Image (cartoon, helix red, strand yellow):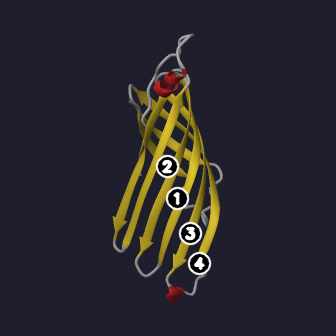
Amino acid sequence: MISLTLNGLAQINAGQSSTDFWNHVRFGGGIGLSFGDGFFSGTLAPSAIYQFNPQFALGVGLNGTYNKRKNYYKSTVFGGSLIGLFNPIPEIQLSAEFEELNVNRKWDDRLNIADENYWYPGLFLGAGFRSHNVAVGIRYDVLYDKDKSIYADPWAPFVRVYF
């Protein structure tokens, strides 16, 4: 999945009006699409980030995902996240993201598996290389549970774009 986050840099001068708040907010998000033999997955994950200064930003995001594996299961996933970004130097981006997702899986009746509905937390720590508007890197879910996670692996690459 490729994740895009839009962001920018600005400074607050003393005496500026509160409408300058919106000059520091950047909108973005992620779109994911995966399909194969009898499988489909689609994700829409909008986000907003507030850029405090060139080194530090905080934001929130939403996540909506639909999965279907023919003759096996259907699932919907909804939730939100909090993200913090830190650039110790312009070329390096460190990130921490807490995600809380509600997972609703409905299994095919022929499988005799009980449907599931549960909350799943994720805490991703990441590092990447940043060049101008783009950051590319990898993140790791320190709370990963292979039986409950919607992700196949605790390691996930990311791409973030800032405007």
Q: Disc 2 marks which residue?
A: 156
Q: Disc 4 marks which residue?
A: 115
Horizontal side of residue 18 vs 70, given as left or right: right
Q: Residue type at mark 2?
A: Ala
Instruction: Say which label, 2 or 3, has the lower sequence index.
Output: 3
Within-10-Å neighbours for mark 2: few <14, some 14–19, many 20+: some
Instruction: Say which label, 2 or 4, has the lower sequence index.
Output: 4
Expressed as whole percent of the image width and height from the top left, the position of residue 138 reads: 49, 42
Instruction: Say which label, 1 or 4, has the lower sequence index.
Output: 4
Give me the C-alpha separation between circle 2 and circle 4: 27 Å
Residue at (48, 34) in percent of width and height = 128
Secondary structure found at label 1: loop
Residue at (61, 70) in percent of width and height = 117
Q: Disc 1 marks which residue?
A: 151
Determine contact: label 4, label 3, CB under 8 Å: yes
Determine contact: label 2, label 1, CB under 8 Å: yes
Horizontal side of residue 88 vs 45, given as left or right: right
Determine contact: label 2, label 3, CB under 8 Å: no
